[in-house]
Image (spheres, rainbow, N blue to C red):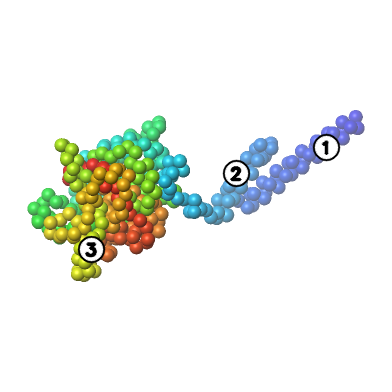
Amino acid sequence: MSSLHTFRGRKRLALAIGLLTCVFLYAFYQGNTHSSVSTCHNTRSLESSRRTLSWKGLINHISQPYYRDLNTLDATSNALQNQERILVLTPLLKNDAVNHLERYFDLLDKSTYPNHLISIGLLIPSSSSSSATEELVESLTKLVNRLQRRWFHAFHEITIYQRDFHFDFDPSTEQQQRDHFKLQPYRRSILARARNYLLSAALQDDHSWVAWMNVDLLSYPATIFEDLIRHNVDVIVPNSLLHTDDGSFWAYERNNWQETDGSMRFQMSVGDDFVMLEGYSELATGRTLLVDMPTHLGPDHLVPLDGVGTSFTLVKAQIHREGANFPSYPFQHQVDTEGFARMVQAMGSSIFGLPSYFVYHARS
């Protein structure tokens, strides 16, 4: 009997200590977190309450710094193996952008780079035609909802941004046709601002690559991301051609180019605010365009470039993070995408093109 009483006494003592511990913990956390706690009924509920209190305490009283080791964020030739994320950016600045959306997403959907590693950022500019803007927003929203509500194969993220730049450029008007060349520096400066807005809003700290793409591309190889990434260079562009019914070779992107002795001498003869433009009969720059280079050396043949466009351009995200953006002002006689190329070179980074690797663009 005495041993039984001793056991019961010890049991009561343990129970009393447990209850006192619960009361003490309750009072302690109540005073420190000012949060309500349920009564401790057993060990499991006690542990659950303690975890809840701890998190509430951290949230309310301790400002934990968010730590991100950027040394581990890299863009490599083994992007797929390393699960590196790509950010695809497209400013929807053309009046007929709504007509190309279905194909734009279809091409991305068919690419062999996993959709869950691809984020997409789209910028819609407000225009004087509110109905056109509303139509674009409505069409885009329906498409995005359809893609992202799938059970599988959804993209990591699709974000739509809107920003008004108070500029409408309609080349169909007779006046703007006459002033097309003279308006280009101003138009390109607006495009540069749009790209910078989109870049700063969409770039996250886990993106390794940034792909700039036009909405009106007609076709490109499904393996394009892996094909371009494999070269492991800072900035790389394929050769962007115009789609033709007969399959003939016709240039589209004329902003991918190399400087020549003649183009360098010309720049020395003009003022610092003079903007060089490619593809206009009013100005012969003397540069060598990617679309004019030989294409018989195979799709992996690289050539160094001094200027790029963004019909399709792949950039290591660190290049943007380190300061290369799209100048809306004359920078070494260039603005927008070609000004970006100037910045990349000034930073000591590399730009390359693939004369024999083709993407095809719709006729404007």
Q: Residue 61: image x %, image y %?
A: 57, 54
Q: Residue at x 23, y 60 (%)?
A: 260
What is the distance, in whole Å, between disc 2 and disc 3 at their CAs? 70 Å
Q: Residue 210: image x %, image y %?
A: 36, 49
| Residue position for label 3 | 261
Q: Amino acid at mark 3?
A: Asp
Crowding at dot 1, Cα within 10 Å, few <14 / some 14-19 / many 20+, comes out as few
Q: Quadrant of residue 9?
A: top right
Is disc 2 in contact with disc 3, using a CB cutoff of under 8 Å?
Answer: no
Q: Quadrant of residue 265?
A: bottom left
Pick the quarter of the image with the C terminus. Answer: top left
In primary-sequence order, the first of circles 1 and 3 is 1
Label 2: which secondary element:
helix
Q: Residue 225: image x %, image y %?
A: 35, 42
Is disc 1 in contact with disc 3, using a CB cutoff of under 8 Å?
Answer: no
Q: Residue furthest front?
A: 297
Label 1: which secondary element:
helix
Residue 169 lies left or right of residue 32; in this view the side is left
What is the distance, in whole Å, between disc 1 and disc 3 at their CAs? 97 Å
Q: Residue 5: image x %, image y %?
A: 87, 33
Q: Single out the mark in the foreground, 2 or 3.
A: 3
Task: Please give the label number shown on residue 10.
Answer: 1
Q: Amino acid at mark 2?
A: Thr
Q: Residue furthest top?
A: 1
In primary-sequence order, the first of circles 2 and 1 is 1
Task: Please give the label number shown on residue 52.
Answer: 2
Q: Is residue 201 visible?
A: no
